[in-house]
Structures are given as C-alpha cells and as structure tokens.
Amino acid sequence: MDITSAAIDFNIIYPEICLLVASFVIFVLPFFKGPSKTAPVIAFLGLFAAALATVNQWGSQGSGFYGMVACDNFGVAFKFIFVLTSTLALLMGYRYLSAKGINRPEFYGLLLVSTVGMMVMANSTDLVVIFLGLEVMSVPLYVMAGMARRSLESNEAGIKYFIMGAFASAFLLMGIAFVFGASGTTDLRRIVADFSFIMSSARPYLLLGVSLLLVGFGFKVAAVPFHSWVPDVYQGAPTPVTAFFSVGPKAAGFAALLRVFMYGFVDVAVLTTVFQVLAILTMTVGNVLALRQNNVKRLLAYSSIAHAGYIFVALVAGGAEGISSAVFYLVAYAFFNLGGFAVVVLLETRSGCRSNFSELAGLAKTHPYLSAVLALFMFALSGFPPTVGFVGKFYVFAAAVKAGFIPLVVIGVMNSFLSVYYYLRVVKTSYFDSSETAFIPVRYSPAIILVLIVTAAGTLGMGLFPEQLLDFSKAALFAFL
Amino acid sequence: MEREILTLVTFFPLVGVVLLMLLPKDRHDSIKGFSLIISFVTFLFSTWLYYMFDPVANGMQFVVNIPWITSLGISYHMGIDGISLLLIVLTTVLTVLSILASWNSITTGVKGYYISMLLLETGMIGVFCALDLFMFYVFWEVMLVPMYFIIGLWGGPRKVYAAIKFVLFTMFGSLLMLVGIIYILFEYQKFSGVFSFDMVRIISELPLGYQAQLWLFGAFALAFAIKVPLFPFHTWLPDAHVQAPTAGSVILAGVLLKMGTYGFIRICLPLFPEATIAYLPYICVLSLIAIIYGALVAMVQKDVKSLVAFSSVSHMGFVMLGMFALNMQGLEGSIIQMINHGISTGALFLLVGMIYERRHTRLIEDFGGLAKVMPTFAAFFMIITLSSIGLPFTNGFIGEFLILLGAFKKNSIYGIIGATGVIFAACYMLWMYQRVFFGKVTSQENKKLLDLDWREKIILIPLVGLVFWIGVYPKPLFERIEPAVKQVITQVGRATTVEVDENYQIKRKLATADAVETEVTFQTEELSDE
C-alpha cells in the first residue's frame, strides 16, 4: 500500500463519523434509559449533520488514510444520494414499523451503519477498503431484511439475502485476491499506473480477478444473471427496508463499479462488451419478468432490476459522459423510486394489506391526491416527460449514442417501451378499476407526507428544470481522471 | 406582447388547470364554466395570432428562443409558420367545442376530466409551436398522459383496453424517434461544433448521408405513421376512437392525427429529402391502401362511430397521398385536408355523440327515419356528410381535389386509385345517412327523440360556418400556407427535380381565384400541359 500520500485525515470522513456517532448513541442508549422513542430523532440529527458535512466536502479534492480513501466530487455526489436515501427511508419507516410492531431502535442504528458502509464503498480507491465498505453496508442489511421476526417471508428474505450475499462477498474477495496476485497491489492508482506492465505479465489472472469482481458488484446492483435474490428479498423485507434496498446498495454498487471499472480497469477493452451484454440482459429480463407481476412490491423489485440495466448502458458509454449520466440517473432514480415505495408503504400501513394489484382498485376515487402522486412516479419510472425519469433516460441514451452504441440504445428504448405497459397497469388499476369491497382509508403521517412532497417535487421539478442536477452530475467526476 | 403570444397561447390552458385544481370537486358548474372560459380565451388568443400573422413573410414568425437546458443544447424555441398557424387555430376551436360538448355527458370525475382537457390542449398546441426537437418530443409525449386518462376513465365499455393500446402504440413509435433525435443532435454537433436541437438550423445546415437518412426517416416516419395512422399501423385507431368519450374522439380525430402528418411535413420531408424520395413509392402505396381499405371497412360497420373512425383512416390516407405527391397542389391540398378532416370528422363525432346521449346506442339498425323526428339534426348531419364526401362548395372538395390533382401529376395510377376512394366515401357516408335518417320511424323510442337544443346548435354552427367558408373562399388559408409549402418543396427539391416553377404558376392562379374558378383554372392548366 501507498505510504507516500497523506496519512490519516479525518476531514474526509466527517460524514461517516457523524453517522457512526449517531448510530453508537442509538445502540447504547437503550442500556441506560430502556427502550425509548428518541432513536429516529437521533438518526435524523446524525443524517442532518452528515448532510452538512457532505455539502462542505463538495468541490474539495484529496485523499487520506495512506491513499486508501479519496475525496472527490464523484464520491461526495454519492454521499448525497446515500444520505438522501436513508433519510427518506427513515421518514417512511417510523409509522410503518410501529404499525407492524417492529419499531425497534436497532433499525435506525443499522440504517446508519449501512449508510456508512456505502459511503466507504463509494469513496475508496483501494480494493480492500471497498470490500470493507461493502461488508459494513451488507451485514446490517441482512439483519434489516429479516427485521419482522414473526413474518415468515421476512425471515426468508433475511436468510436468502444473507446466503446469497455471502457468496457474492466471497466472489469479490476472490477477485481481489487474483488482482492482487496479478499486480501485487490492491491500490487502484498503482494498478492504473502499472497497467500495461500488469497486462503483459499477468493478463489471465488479472482478467479472472476482474470478472470475479464484476460478479460481486453485479450481485449488489442486482444485474442479471445475479438477480435471483431480488424478488423474494424485496417482497419479504419490511417495505421501508425494501425502499432502502432498491436505491442505497444499488447506488453504492454502481459507485464501486464505476470507480473500479471506469478508473481502475478502464483499459480492459473487453469490459465494454461485457457491460453491453449485462445491460441488455438486465434490462430485458427485468422488464419481461415485471410484465406478469400481480404485486406492486414485486413489480417494483423487477423494475429496479431493469433500471440497473439502464445504468449499465451508461457504463457502456463510458468516459465523463457515461459517469455523469449514471450519477444523474441514480439521483433521479432515488427520487421517483423512493416516491413509489413511499406510496406502497402508506398503503401497507393499513392492516392486512399486502399491496397486491387488486388492493389498489378504487384508490383514485377515495384518495385522488395519493393516486395522482402514484401515477406521477409510475410515469417517471417509465420515462415520460416532463418528469426527471425522462431526462435521466435521455441523458443515459444520449451518452451511449454519442459513444456510438446505437443498437444498444434501440434495445434500451424498446425495453423502456415494455416497461410502459406494466407501470401503466399500476395507474390503470388505481384509476380505472373499481373494487367490490370498500377501500380502507389510508392514514397519513407528517413524515410520509414530507417524503411524498419531497420526492414528487424532485421528480417533477428536476424534470422541468434539470439544469442544476445536470451541472451537479457533470461535476461529479473522479479527481484522478 | 407579440413575442410572448405563442407562450401565451400554449400555456394559457395551464392557468385553467391551476384554477380548476383549487376549486372543490363537487362544484360542477363553476368547473365547467371556468374551463369553457379558459378555452375560449385561448381561442381568442389564437384568432389574434391569426390576424397578426403575416401571410407574405417567409420562415417562422413570433419566434421565441430562450436557452432552457444549456448543457444539453436544449432551448425554449417556439415559432410558427402558416401550417402550424392553421393547426393551432383548429386545436383551439375544437377544444372549445369539445368542452361544450362534454357539458352534460360527463357526470363523474368532472374536475379531473376538464383538467385533462386543458392539459391536452397545452400539449397539442405545444407540438405545433415547438421548433426545438427536444421540446417537440416532450410535448408529443406529454399529451399522451391526459388522453390516456380521457379514454380510460370516461370512455366506453372497452375503454381500458383502448387507452392502453393507444399509449403503447404511440410510445413504440416515439421512442424510436427519440433515438433518432439524439443521433441528429450528435451529428449536428459533429458538423457545427454546437450542441443544438434547433429544428430550423438543423434542417437548413445539416448534411446527412444517404444511409443515415434512410434510417432516421424510418425512425421518425414510424412514430408519425402510427399517429396518422397509416395502414398497417392503424389498428389502435378504431379502438381509441370508438371507446373514447365524444370530446376525446373529436380531439383524437381532429388534432392528434394531424400531429402525425404535421411531423412528416415539419421534420421528415425537409430533414431527409433523399430518403423521402426513396420511401415515396412505399408511402404512396400504403396511403392508397389506407384510402381504399378504410373506406371498405367503414362501409360494413354497424356502429356509426366505428364508421366515422374508419373513414378517418381513409381520409388520412388522402392527406398522406397528397403530401407525398411532393408538388404544390398535393402538399397544399394535404394541409387543407388536414384542417378539413379536423372540422368534418370532428363534427361527425360530435353529431354521433349527440344522438348517443339521447338514445344510448350508435347502431345504424336501431335508427331510421330520424329526419322526421329531428329535422335540424338531420340537416346538420347532411351538411357535414357532404363536406366529408367532398362536395363542391364544401371544404372537403378543395382539399381532395387538390390532393388528387397532385397525385395525378405524380403518377396517374395513384390519382385513379385515390379517386375511387372518393366514390367509396360517398357510398358509405350516404348509405349510412339513408339508413339512419330516411325511411319510416321503426322504433317507438326514436319517435320521442328531441331535436337539438341551443347548446348543441352553438357547437355545430361554427363548424358548418367553417365548412362553407373554406369551401367557398379558401384564399386566406392558401395565402398563409403558401410560403411554408414552397419552402418544404424547395427543401425536398434539394434532392430532386421537382418542377417548382411550373407548379408555382398554377399556384398563383389558385390564390387569386375562388373555388369554382379554381377548378376551371386547373383543368385548363392540365390541358395546356398536354
């Protein structure tokens, strides 16, 4: 490891520290005061402090911890996404978890620890530290998936995610080992510097290592064919956790993918082809399987696979355009996907509701605003203008066209066409179908209303005026590029 | 003010949307009243636009060009020429009438319905004003959403199927168009070094290779052909038109179909001239099939609304045929026919809606002898029927005559086959009219039918007025579209040897003559050619 660069520099991990402190307080507090209701407040304060610290980091460049952790706009942009995601998940969670009888302080602590893991993953330039981040992110997620202890499905989700996740970690670790064997280092910057030498001396080992790394990250971002865990885990886990799953770990996985493959192994030519195959598979399988789903949560699970496919299109495009379009898409996706999940959370807070399609019937007649918001998110997910979903897809596809991958873009838009069908089914059920039984009224809480307003305003506002977000994602580049 | 007028016309309905959102949902009268006022004011703005429009000027007028998303080269770029002007006025007229026509027929979800109508109006006018490819696409897609709800929520028995089919068909085409738009963006950037979606600059500057043109034309033409709809992409149309509520059908037939043909004129022809020539025979053949097939299918319909829907396929076939004749007469006829079709088919749907409100059936066999029970209704229906057939002195004649003239000039076979379509049109329309209005009143229920009330007359009178105005004195319309049409001809002419001069001479005479003289002029011209 590189000894020459700056040593321990706490400046660059202030956001992580804020979250860690908050999570420790949450974990330790019950020992002194017994179960209390302060956990969400402390978590919120921690996230707020982390957000402030993140804002402070925007624009600065540097690295610390012997060059293992970087501080650049790319990583900071992802820190924003993570803080946003866990704040929204936290706001969604409170009422839901109380209603299900699982409102325990651990949820908030684990949420924060997982967020720290994501931040480490997005900001590290060393494969071992990336792995460390990945584990810190994943272990709390295993617990959170199985949080509803008395629900069989939640238990299944927890165990399934844990076993599959452990396998994926093993692949990743094996990949790191091979890369280390081939290059003698796990530092991405050293690998980049000696790349041609490594390629000439240990090509097969390096390629083997790189492909194993891809398997590990592919699992986290739910790329096909590493997606098989997604539907059951997403459906079984408590819905706020699912919402968090669908955005947080995915974004973290892409952050690591982008940094490792767009910076570290950017010269491995075969990767473009591999990404292309992954993109086509992920988009197509996700969308085709979503077509026949009859449960909104499961549908959103498959749709989240498809969206990972669109981001792979950005990876295929590569270069600065590819990176910034991926960042743009992830921010946009965070808004409308979390919004969609917030509506599901709200519906599921009613007793006995499992968010099957049939339960949506009659929503528009009894809850016009909620159904309008749900429709907005569905249109955004399917990429209709003037939502940010359209701008995101446009930007990703534009990057790919610019790089000359027109057939891939045609496959992408055709997938987007497929997706219109099933997203519209949600809108159709809530607006056009009438239910035989009376629609159980939804009980709003201030927190969830805030989530809905923020996500809806973001979806529509950034769709009409995407300039700021475009500038933001254009600036979100690696410091080393 | 003059600079902002397009913005005003396009977005004024949105003011109504905000207003309606603030109203409580059970105050139906104020909701209806406000949306009528808003749409009427929008119409007044559009008439003002019509009078301020300078018929002799070339190029775009009332241009607004403000950077919108600078990093992607997207700007808020609006402007109109004569073609868009007429379509905008058509849109605003039909929206006012549609809102009036929905007065009593929409009883559930009133607030949502009128919000959708006004949103739709903004979307439609936006398509006709946009000079930025990105904006064009945004408006093109945005207008799908309210239409989806209008069909799906207030439509007939199979409304949900029809609504989803409508959206999916349109999306399929337009997504490929999106790829085309992105490709053009980068081609233009490679060529000029600037990121820009500016249609005017792209059309006048960007040289595209033959292969690229073929592909791009395919992508754009598919999107537009589905919208028109050109045979064999028409299968969404009967479903959507029949299932939509009356106002929805009026807007669909009157304006939405025109967005397809407008797209061809505005983008496909000038931007891909060589590809236009290459695709020309195929599109002409498809148009001819649409003319004949649409007419034959219309003939055997049992439901009046389906009959009108299939007649749209046939009429839009005429529009496409005229356009791809690529000469002055054909193109002008095609544009006039776009307006005519909006007026006459819109009116037909309104009339069918009026009888449906009374009798709750549209089957031809349920009627008979209505002329005795509802004389005013029968008279209006007759006028519109004749306009749809294309009788001289009605608007339909001007359009179809010019289209056929253009088609004959292009290829006499096209002209001959196209002309048989006119005969078929007379067959199905008049046969339907005979079965519905003449003979004895067979059903007891039909004897009690009330004739039109004042509201319904108010809806129909402007349309009948337009039928005769365009039929007798089309000069103002021709004046306004002439520079735009000439420009399209010259733009396509870059790639081919269209005899612009000869056509131009004929054109002049047309512009100074009235309808009857026009016919004579053209005949002599044709003779002298030989």
Image (cartoon, grey):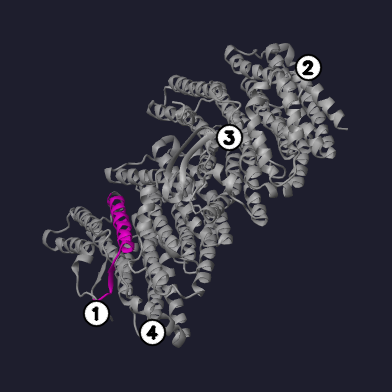
Q: Nearer the viewer, mark 2 or mark 1?
A: 1
Q: Which residue is found at the position 85% from the left and 39% from the top? A: B413
Residue at the spot of label 1: A4
Residue at the spot of label 4: A183
Number of other residues with Cα within 10 Å of mark 3, as a class: few under 14, some 14 to 19, many 20 or more:
some
Mark earlier in primary sequence (2, 3): 3
Disc sitting over residue B438 in the figure: 2
Q: Quadrant of residue A372?
A: top left
Outermost residue, left direction? A32
| First to last magenta residue range | A66-94
Q: Which residue is found at the position 44% from the left and 66% from the top? A: A229
Residue at the spot of label 3: B59
Q: What residue type is labelled 4?
A: Ser
In three-dimensional space, the C-alpha distance between marks 2 and 4, rounded to whole angstroms, equals: 92 Å
Q: Position of residue A390 (x, y in %)?
A: 47, 49
Instruction: Please tell me whether mark 1 sits on a helix, a strand or a loop.
Output: loop
Q: Which chain carries label 4?
A: A
Q: Where is residue A318 in the image (x, y as percent from the top left)?
A: 46, 65
